[in-house]
């Protein structure tokens, strides 16, 4: 009986020991899974972070999701349950090209700047812009001291249909060049396409406030055909000339939007101090609740100043030089990634 008792006790101890080992293994596995899940969440957070585009990036804020998410890290529309819908369908998905969040200091601090031409190409680009502005101002009857809402809407809508062309044309030409030469583009394509999308969004915001008539639309079609053909031809011959042209064109855009803001403040467009901005603008620029038309014009002007600086920079670069704005974005992403990894190592669960 004593032998049986000792044997039973030994079996019980071994069984208890095995149960404790199993529980310990389960606890270890559970902690490992929790660690993997936290790591996955951190990686997803990193992938969802947008890099600030433009020459005046704001400090990173984890509560704000902004700027373009790279296609490589973006979930497919199908995986998110998104399908093709009619434009009038309320389920139509949001624009995946999310815009930077401009701070109040940045939009208020936009200055009228001018790049002094230094060569024949620069002088030709500036002369072309001045001639285009004089012709358009003459035909449209635009006078800064006699601005009205209709004048502003007509001018903004027409010019934005033109402003969206250079980025798309330049990006397309760089894309085709990359394919032909079978080499990388050094970061120009995405910035140019982002510029084109930004100008298109300016247009879509303004057409929610006024729908152009058939004559206006016919003029847009004709102008687009002529300008697109001329711009692509010039880009094939000498790209820096085109980027300098766009830089000077954006200088004029900053002047125009500054005149509009001045007219709002001095009472000519006083209603825009309190009139609410369209919801599409609030969503795209992540504007504050209750944002007004004045706030809208401020962020549009900030966009134009960014395009001005970017294109003047591109005009100074060689075709094979790296886009400095992409380098800046990559540095910011690396800093965020290193911060996340260091926090993970410091976490006691790891």
Image: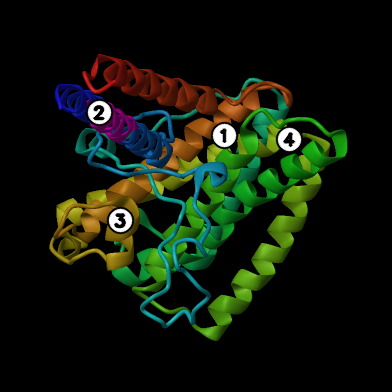
Closest to the observer, 188 or 250: 188
- Say which mark, if any, is on residue 11: 2
Q: In which quarter of the image is the C terminus?
A: top left
SS type, badge 1: helix
Question: In the visual, does 154 lie left or right of 276?
Answer: right
**Residue occupying the point 57% across, 34% down:** 311
Q: How is the image coloured?
A: rainbow
Query: Residue 231 at what x, y percent from top left?
Result: 72, 49
Question: In the visual, does 221 lie left or right of 112?
Answer: right
Question: In the visual, does 63 lie left or right of 153?
Answer: left
Mark closer to the chain start, 2 or 3: 2
For label 1, count other residues whose C-alpha is less than 10 Å away and answer few (under 14), some (14-19) or many (20+).
Answer: many
Mark closer to the chain start, 4 or 3: 3
Residue 260 seen in render: no
Q: Marks 1/3: CA distance?
A: 29 Å
- Closer to the eye: label 2 or 1: 2
Report the span colored magenta.
17-32
Closest to the observer, 220 or 330: 330
Label 3 sits on residue: 145
Label 4 sits on residue: 239
Residue 249 seen in render: yes
Contact between marks 4 and 3 (CB within 8 A): the answer is no
Magenta stretch contains residue 133: no
- Say which mark, if any, is on residue 277: none
Label 1 sits on residue: 311
SS type, badge 2: helix
Q: In which quarter of the image is residue 318?
A: top right
For label 4, count other residues whose C-alpha is less than 10 Å away and answer few (under 14), some (14-19) or many (20+).
Answer: many
Mark closer to the chain start, 1 or 3: 3
- Closer to the eye: label 2 or 3: 2
Vertical placement of 81 versus 60: above or below? below
């Amino acid at each position: 009986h004593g032998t049986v008792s000792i044997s039973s006790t030994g079996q019980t101890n071994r069984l208890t020991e095995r149960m404790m080992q199993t529980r310990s293994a389960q606890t270890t596995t559970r902690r490992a899974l929790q660690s993997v899940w936290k790591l996955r969440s951190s990686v997803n957070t990193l992938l969802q972070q947008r890099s600030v585009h433009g020459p005046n990036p704001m400090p990173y804020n984890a509560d704000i999701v902004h700027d373009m998410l790279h296609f490589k890290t973006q979930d497919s529309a199908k995986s998110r349950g998104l399908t093709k819908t009619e434009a009038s369908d309320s389920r139509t998905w949001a624009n995946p090209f999310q815009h930077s969040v401009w701070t109040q200091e940045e939009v208020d601090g936009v200055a009228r700047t001018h790049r002094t031409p230094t060569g024949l190409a620069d002088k030709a680009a500036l002369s072309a812009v001045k001639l285009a502005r004089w012709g358009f101002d003459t035909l449209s009857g635009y006078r800064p001291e006699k601005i009205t809402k209709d004048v502003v809407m007509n001018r903004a809508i027409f010019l934005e249909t033109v402003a969206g062309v250079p980025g798309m044309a330049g990006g397309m030409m760089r894309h085709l060049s990359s394919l032909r030469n079978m080499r990388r583009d050094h970061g120009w394509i995405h910035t140019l396409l982002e510029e084109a999308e930004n100008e298109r969004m300016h247009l879509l915001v303004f057409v929610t406030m006024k729908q152009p008539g058939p004559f206006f639309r016919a003029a847009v079609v004709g102008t687009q055909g002529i300008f697109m053909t001329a711009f692509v031809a010039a880009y094939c011959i000498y790209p820096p000339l085109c980027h300098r042209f766009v830089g000077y064109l954006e200088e004029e855009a900053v002047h125009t939007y500054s005149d509009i803001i001045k007219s709002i403040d001095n009472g000519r467009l006083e209603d825009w101090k309190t009139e609410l901005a369209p919801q599409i603008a609030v969503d795209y620029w992540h504007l504050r609740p209750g944002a007004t038309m004045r706030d809208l014009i401020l962020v549009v002007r900030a966009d134009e100043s960014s395009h001005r600086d970017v294109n003047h920079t591109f005009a100074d670069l060689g075709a094979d030089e790296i886009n400095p704005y992409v380098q800046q974005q990559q540095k910011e992403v690396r800093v965020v990634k290193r911060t996340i990894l260091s926090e993970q190592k410091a976490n006691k669960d790891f």
